[in-house]
Image (cartoon, rainbow, N blue to C red):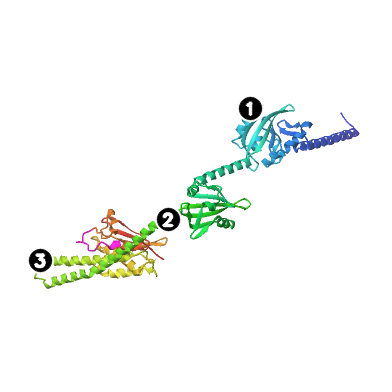
Amino acid sequence: MSFTIDEMHARLAIREERILELEARLAEAEETLHAIRTGEVDALVVSGPDGDQIFALEGADHAYRLLVEEMQEGTVTLNQDGLILYANRRFAAMMKAPVESIVGSNIQRFLAADRYPMFARMLANNKTQPQRCELTLLATDRTQIPVHVALNWLHTGGIRTICVVINDLTEQRHYEAMVEDGELSRLILEQAAEAIVVIDARGMILRASESAQKLAARNILLQPFDTVFHLREGDNPIDTAQLLSAALAGEGFKSSEVSLLHSDKSYSTLLLSAGPLWSENRELLGCAITLTDITERKKSEEALAWQAQELERSNSDLRQFAYAVSHDLREPIRIVTIYSQLLEKKYKGSLDEQAAAFIQHTVEAAQRVETLLEDLLAYTQTAEGPQTVDSPVDANVCWAKILGLFEAAIAESGAIVTSDPLPVLRVTEVHIQQLLQNLVGNSLKYRSQAPPRIHISAERERDMWKLSVADNGIGIDEQYHKQVFGLFKRLHGSGKYAGSGMGLAICHKIVERYGGRMWIESEAGKGSKFFFTLPGE
């Protein structure tokens, strides 16, 4: 078929006119759909597999829709698959999303994963009676919202739908938590071991623990605090005006000790503290007052203080006695020694062997007693209380003096004596010399068949220095490690090793005097290592 040019132009004109008409209708349809989606007209549009479906609202329902939009509860309309056909502004606000983004989506989007199966079963029940439950919704920012939901099945325009009314329980849960906290606080207050009293801004007792009731020996609720608890700090009374004044100034009230006068005129000793209670508007509501009864503890402390005083007096008497005995007996013992030696010298060769042995035993015994008295005097002098030091001492200097003192014994025994760098110590010089002299002397005395090897070292321990003196001597069995520090404790008879058995006791007492400690690591036949700690720079 052929057309003339005029016929072709006519046909093109008709087609263009038709296209313009279709474009106008499409724009009108899109405008209508947008108006429906945004709620500008009384209809709902739901996108589905078959395209957009329009659910028009009847004109008589318009007033109800306006009412639903103004409700404080969230409201949605669903089909049986959970598709949201309608949502009011309250639900949109709860979900923190615009209405147009909610309509057409599935309710599952706004339900916690563990709650959706239960909600899906409710949708599938298809009951005619309303159903209710509590759920957790998830807003678009993932905030969890506890809600109560009520489901009602409806028939509108031949379509079965489900109307869901959603009540936000956030505030209710918060209130319930506050009530629970309040109840818990009340139970804690009542069961507290200490006496705790809550007063208002007038000084009236609003709450009190059971211990506070017992302390007052009567019911104290709604009573003025000052009439129940008569408190004094020294000679000064303490009342609620002082407590509230301190609280109003933003401070707590604390006192080391106060006395409480009871109705029977007896007293209790208490520790008092009070803290302010503020409202959200920073208005002073009152004070929480704690009264800790320390009466028995105070009596125990006083008894212990008296016992300590008596013990110190007794120890002082014993030290003075020991000093006097050791000092006064040295002279007669020295006389016995001298005259025994003179007797031995004068009659040497005139006495028989037995008489000479008797004189020799007398001299040796007198010398041992004199040594013992000297050690006892040294021990009593080191037994005084904590030592204060005016100036520190270089332990290296003291060690050099000790080596000079034992120079002959070291040379005679073939001993090898070595030392690490030693610290500066906050001790009296004579005390560190006594320590080192006793320990080095023991290492040289209690040596094995091999030449003695003695080494002193030191290492830092926080504010103290740990020093050690090690040797390769005969050693000490573990069972005697504590015994060797006792008074007059000797593991060997006086025949082979001379001494009074007080050297290590003196060392131990010196170390204790400076707040340190002393111990030993040793095995029989494997040498010994004595440790002690002293304060240093």
- Asked if the residue under mark 1 is in contact with the one under mark 2, i.e. CB atoms within 8 Å, the reply is no
Q: Amino acid at mark 1?
A: Asn
Q: Nearer the viewer, mark 2 or mark 1?
A: 2
Q: Position of residue 442 (x, y in %)?
A: 27, 63
Give the CA distance from mark 1 to mark 3.
Answer: 126 Å
> SS at mark 3?
helix
Between discs 2 and 3, the one toward the N terminus = 2
- Name the residue located 36 percent from the left edge and 58 percent from the top edge: 307
- Name the residue located 15 percent from the left edge and 72 percent from the top edge: 342
Residue 16 visible at all:
yes
Residue 494 within the magenta-colored segment of the rendering: yes
Q: Nearer the viewer, mark 2 or mark 3?
A: 2
Q: Amino acid at mark 3?
A: Glu
Number of numbered labels in the structure image: 3
- Asked if the residue under mark 3 is in contact with the one under mark 1, i.e. CB atoms within 8 Å, the reply is no
Q: Position of residue 293 (x, y in %)?
A: 46, 52
> SS at mark 2?
helix
> SS at mark 1?
helix
Between discs 1 and 3, the one toward the N terminus = 1
Q: Quadrant of residue 299?
A: bottom left
Q: Is residue 302 left or right of residue 40?
A: left
Give the CA distance from mark 2 to mark 3.
Answer: 71 Å
Segment tinted magenta in the rendering: 492-505
Determine whether 6 is above or below 341 in the image: above
Residue underneath mark 2: 298
